[in-house]
């Protein structure tokens, strides 16, 4: 019964679509879904008809979990919020431009027709006829450049505003959450600090805590942490932990190198500070040999590690 | 109890011998520092390197030949054609002034040295001075022996050599010396509370401001140091006098540099120094009042005073920032904190390779074993924690962050790494070169700790005064730096090293590491940092050296074969070199002050011929110069830089130039058959690969940089013609054709000359060309 109903519905919708999707129909569909028209192939053809008097920004995406398209789901909220901002515009301008989305499940043949092999893609279709046709340079069809603008809603609104009849009145929703938590945290820590001041002062004025923080920071910084952060390098890749190339590294290398530097520095410190305080000659001698051995081995490891990065390096130790 | 009987000398003999050895060692260190920077001169010749140095050299020549006033008022009409550049007001003149002074002194002494040689050898000379300044600063932190180690480290560490080899005549060449000497004098001023030293620090600060844009590092380091000392409750009148003298004199002096002008009171970079200055006045005022009032009144007054001052100061800062009287952080500095900022908003800064973040191999390459002695040294600084140690700790934190964000700032990290590493290594040597052996508790059965333990405790909890006393005693008794100091300092201590084998092991290992360090530094310097990049070297199959001199060949071709006023367009990297070597006007150069002008060049390079041509004609361009490495595999060529041209042009004309158009549909950067249409039609592509196929006589052409096979059909040129191609095809120069005398567009004219009949669709393209 349900199947029959579905088939009937499909036939009905198809016949309706074939019967010509009007501008009013598009406006209705957009209004029904917070400004975003959910497309199927028929609606897509209607929206991008060669005699269209409106412009459209169409998101080609693959949201269903089976495609595992995480950028799609990252971008979708931004697109929706920009479309929602547009739906608040006065109807005279609003109905000159549509936001629409086409999912891969709904319109595989459209994807195939356009030669799209990746998602998400945001394509802008300018108006071709009627009063809202724009002057020449803005009349081109283009796809939104994610590598340049990213997935951010604000950037999207800014870039699309150059092409819509009037600029999109998008304002980023104010994020109360960090302010709220920050304020609460501040108050709580002030209160706690008032009562625990005696202990807190000990901690703040403890130079070895500061030393640990300083040394930790320098170690992390000198092992390329900022490189990984800025370039967005992955932590590691399946087949190799070490990135090829001299000017390149993965996240895991930060840990390895920082640990190596830290251990090497620590063994020097042990030789300088700890060893002379061992009162027994035998134990002292053993630890001198131990720390020097550690030093030597770790240094060899470091150099062999460096040789992986820089193939032409002529020096090597044990390894 | 000692493990080795040392011969005894009179204390005065020891002192004299020690200072003689120190002076000799410093002289040798300076010699080593200078000579290790001469690889480039020996391997190639005495030549100015890279890009920016060519401008500095050109400016210095003007200074040397025409005098300082002319130089100061120099307007250069050939740069940034047709805009020109007011050189005197847009440079840091310290470098040129320094070489000008040296040149004049040498000539006054009747030593007829060429100004070029002064410029080439300036950086190595100053590296010797840097070693001395580092020695002085490290001496304040620990002692002379650590100072000597620090001097030799900074003398040969590749992190500093990379910017100061002979021929790299850039601001950094003298700036690092100025950085270290300013810091040293600041520490001295702080230790003595001396206004004289504070003023001297300000004088060197002024020199630094006149020499390098990186002076902002000092402008923020010294206030930060003062501020942290305040927070640690270490306010003293010494700090007050030193800081006030430095800030007042230094700020006034720095405003005399035209390029800096009123920035010290108007921009956020300098606000920290001003704020700390105000804060110190407040604190000093409060301290004075405290001495005059009874404690209860004082408490009340202090509270109200501080609240009022804090509110007033905060309101003033907020007000000035809101009304834009205080400029916000400039992009270059801001991008250090918000690392994504530059790529998004100022691609011209992000495009420079030395502004990229640093991966770990670069740290190891530039600092070798110092990089892991660095944290050990920082810990030892925490152990002492006098005022100067606080300074080094702050310095190490800031510099290691900056070096991580930008490869270029490795330069500021290197001195502090050298100092702390020297502290660590010298502590190690002190401990293991000490000939005294502690009493053996196993043999005696009795520990001496009870008697001597209270006198010389080692952990950090002892009072400062006592520590100072010990340090002073040690310094007074300073004889042969490492051996005897400790011997006198703690005879019969319970801490120490047993046996001679342990000593030999540790010292031997340290010496081994040092040898590795020297080998590493020499290798890195000779292979990586001594290439002039104007002249390239390659190895022939039989191992002999092959010098590739295409750049100078092409620049001299321009100089000899073109009219003096013909305008040359190239990407901005080569602007200074063209001005310096070919002596021709350029559209854009390495002083990247006008983004739109650079974007115009980017647009001309990345557009099709018929769109570029009107741009070229409007800017009177006569010749276009491109760098092409596809034939011999020179990877720093213009096709590899092309995406930055596109990006920068896109920043100004987002509707006409789009980065994505230059990639294949699959998002790859290709120059072969699959290259995108925009790529194939761009002027840059056409100029790079024009007639490239002819070289391969029928076989498919192959680009050795991008490892791609070129299309069978090479590009055709209608609006420009090839004028010159250098021996290895690295530099290619094209002449822009004049408008056709018959009024046809050049494409039609070219086709007509080639004897081909065009289809009658041509008038359309002509209209297009005119419209664009």
Image (tube, coloured by chain):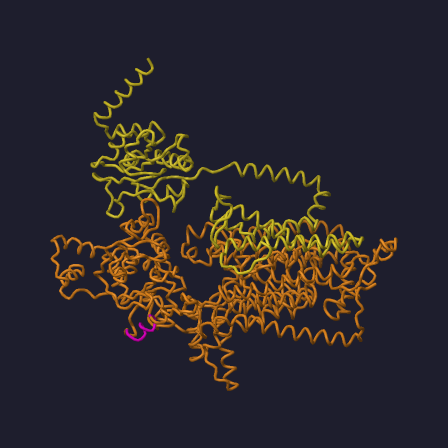
Q: Which residues are magenta?
A: B554-561
Query: Can the viewer see residue B268?
Result: yes
Question: Chain B is shown in which shade?
Answer: orange
Task: Residue B201: say if magenta.
Answer: no
**Is A271 situated left or right of B625 in this image?**
right
On the image, which quarter does residue B243 sit in?
Answer: bottom right
Percent coordinates x, y for residue B24 in the rendering: 65, 75
Q: Tell me how many marks there are.
A: 0
Screen quadrant of the C terminus of chain A: bottom right
**Is B387 situated left or right of B700 in this image?**
right
On the image, which quarter does residue B152 sit in?
Answer: bottom right
Screen quadrant of the N terminus of chain A: top left
Q: Residue furthest bottom?
A: B110
* B615 or B446, nearer to the observer: B446
Question: Chain A is shown in which shade?
Answer: yellow
Q: Is residue A300 above or below residue A184?
A: below
Percent coordinates x, y for residue B16 in the rendering: 73, 76
């Amino acid at each position: 019964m349900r199947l029959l109903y579905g088939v009937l519905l499909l036939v009905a919708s198809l016949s309706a679509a074939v019967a010509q999707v009007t501008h009013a129909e598009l406006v209705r569909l957009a209004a029904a879904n917070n400004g975003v028209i959910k497309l199927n192939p028929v609606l897509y053809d209607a929206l991008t008809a060669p005699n269209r008097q409106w412009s459209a920004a169409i998101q080609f995406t693959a949201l269903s979990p089976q495609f595992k398209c995480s950028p799609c789901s990252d971008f979708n909220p931004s697109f929706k919020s920009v479309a929602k901002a547009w739906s608040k515009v006065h109807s005279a301008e609003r109905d000159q431009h549509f936001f629409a989305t086409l999912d891969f499940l709904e319109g595989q043949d459209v994807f195939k027709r356009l030669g799209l092999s990746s998602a998400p893609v945001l394509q802008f279709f300018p108006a071709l006829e009627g009063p809202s046709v724009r002057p020449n340079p803005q009349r081109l069809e283009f796809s939104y450049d994610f590598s340049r603008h990213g997935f951010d809603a604000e950037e999207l609104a800014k870039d699309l505003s150059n092409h819509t009849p009037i600029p999109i009145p998008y304002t980023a929703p104010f994020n109360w959450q960090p302010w709220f938590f920050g304020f609460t945290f501040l108050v709580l820590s002030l209160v706690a600090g008032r009562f625990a001041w005696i202990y807190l002062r000990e901690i703040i004025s403890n130079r070895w805590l500061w030393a640990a923080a300083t040394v930790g920071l320098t170690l992390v910084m000198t092992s390329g942490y900022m490189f990984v952060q800025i370039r967005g390098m992955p932590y590691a890749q399946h087949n190799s932990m070490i990135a090829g190339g001299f000017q390149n590294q993965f996240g895991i290398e930060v840990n390895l190198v920082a640990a190596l530097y830290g251990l090497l520095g620590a063994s020097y410190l042990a030789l300088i500070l700890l060893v002379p305080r061992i009162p027994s000659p035998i134990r002292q001698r053993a630890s001198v040999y131990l720390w020097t051995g550690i030093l030597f081995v770790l240094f060899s490891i470091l150099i062999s590690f460096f040789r992986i990065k820089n193939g032409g390096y002529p020096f090597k130790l044990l390894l | 109890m000692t493990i080795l009987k040392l011969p005894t000398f009179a204390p005065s003999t020891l002192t004299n011998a020690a200072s003689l050895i120190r002076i000799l060692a410093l002289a040798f260190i300076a010699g080593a520092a200078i000579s290790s920077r001469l690889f480039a001169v020996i391997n190639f010749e005495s030549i100015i390197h890279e890009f920016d140095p060519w401008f500095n050299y050109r400016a210095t020549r003007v200074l040397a030949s025409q005098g300082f006033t002319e130089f100061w008022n120099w307007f250069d009409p050939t740069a940034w054609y047709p805009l020109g550049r007011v050189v005197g007001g847009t440079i840091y003149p310290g470098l040129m002034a320094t070489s000008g002074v040296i040149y004049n002194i040498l000539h006054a002494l009747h030593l007829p040295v060429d100004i070029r040689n002064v410029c080439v050898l300036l950086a190595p000379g100053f590296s010797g001075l840097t070693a001395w300044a580092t020695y002085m600063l490290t001496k304040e932190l620990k002692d002379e022996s650590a100072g000597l180690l620090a001097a030799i480290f900074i003398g040969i560490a590749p992190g500093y050599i990379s910017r100061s080899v002979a021929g790299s005549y850039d601001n950094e060449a003298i700036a690092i010396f100025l950085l270290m000497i300013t810091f040293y004098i600041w520490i001295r001023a702080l230790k003595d509370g001396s206004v004289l030293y504070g003023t001297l620090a300000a004088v060197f600060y002024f020199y630094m401001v006149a020499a390098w844009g990186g002076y902002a590092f000092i402008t923020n380091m010294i206030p930060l140091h003062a501020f942290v000392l305040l927070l640690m409750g270490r306010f003293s009148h010494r700090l007050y006098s030193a800081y006030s003298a430095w800030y007042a004199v230094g700020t006034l002096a720095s405003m005399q540099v035209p390029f800096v002008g009123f920035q010290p009171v108007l921009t956020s970079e300098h606000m920290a120094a001003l704020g700390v200055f105000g804060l110190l006045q407040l604190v000093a005022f409060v301290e004075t009042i405290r001495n005059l009032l009874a404690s209860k009144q004082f408490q009340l007054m202090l509270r109200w005073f501080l609240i009022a001052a804090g509110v007033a100061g905060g309101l003033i800062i907020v007000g000035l920032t809101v009304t834009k009287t205080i400029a916000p952080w400039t992009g270059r500095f801001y991008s250090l904190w918000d690392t994504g900022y530059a790529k998004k908003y100022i691609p011209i800064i992000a495009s420079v390779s030395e502004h990229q973040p640093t991966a770990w191999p670069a740290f190891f390459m530039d600092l070798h074993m110092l990089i892991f002695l660095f944290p050990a040294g920082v810990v030892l600084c925490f152990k002492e924690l006098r005022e100067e140690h606080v300074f080094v700790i702050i310095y190490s934190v800031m510099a290691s962050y900056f070096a991580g964000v930008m490869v270029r700032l490795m330069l500021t990290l290197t001195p502090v790494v050298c100092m702390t590493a020297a502290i660590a290594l010298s502590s190690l040597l002190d401990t293991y070169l000490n000939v005294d052996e502690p009493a053996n508790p196993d043999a005696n059965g009795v520990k001496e700790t009870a008697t001597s333990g209270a006198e010389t405790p080692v952990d950090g909890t002892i009072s400062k005064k006592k520590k100072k006393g010990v340090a002073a005693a040690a310094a007074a008794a300073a004889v042969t730096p490492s051996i005897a100091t400790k011997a006198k300092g703690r005879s019969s201590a319970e801490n120490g090293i047993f046996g001679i084998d342990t000593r030999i092991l540790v010292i031997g290992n340290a010496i081994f590491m040092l040898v590795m360090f020297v080998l590493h530094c020499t290798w890195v310097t000779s292979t990586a940092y001594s290439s002039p990049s104007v002249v390239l070297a390659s190895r022939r199959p039989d191992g002999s050296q092959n010098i590739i001199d295409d750049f100078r060949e092409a620049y001299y071709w321009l100089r000899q074969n073109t009219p003096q006023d013909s305008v040359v367009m190239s990407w901005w990297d080569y602007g200074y070199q063209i001005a310096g070597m070919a002596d021709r006007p350029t559209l854009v150069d390495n002083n990247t002050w006008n983004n739109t002008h650079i974007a115009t060049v980017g647009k001309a390079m990345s557009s099709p011929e018929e769109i570029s041509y009107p741009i070229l004609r409007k800017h009177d361009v006569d010749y276009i110069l491109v760098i092409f490495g596809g034939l011999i595999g020179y990877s720093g060529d213009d096709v590899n830089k092309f995406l930055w041209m596109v990006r920068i042009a896109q920043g100004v004309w987002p509707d006409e130039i789009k980065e994505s158009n230059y990639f294949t549909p699959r998002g790859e950067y290709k120059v072969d058959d699959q290259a995108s249409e925009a790529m194939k039609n761009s002027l840059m592509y056409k100029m790079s690969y024009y007639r490239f196929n002819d070289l391969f006589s029928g076989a498919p052409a192959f680009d050795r940089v991008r490892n791609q096979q070129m299309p069978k059909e090479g590009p055709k040129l209608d609006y420009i013609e090839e004028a010159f191609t250098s021996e290895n095809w690295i530099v290619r120069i094209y002449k822009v054709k004049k408008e056709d005398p018959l009024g046809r567009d050049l494409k039609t004219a070219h086709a007509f000359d080639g004897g081909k009949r065009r289809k009658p669709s041509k008038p359309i393209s002509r209209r297009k060309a005119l419209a664009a």
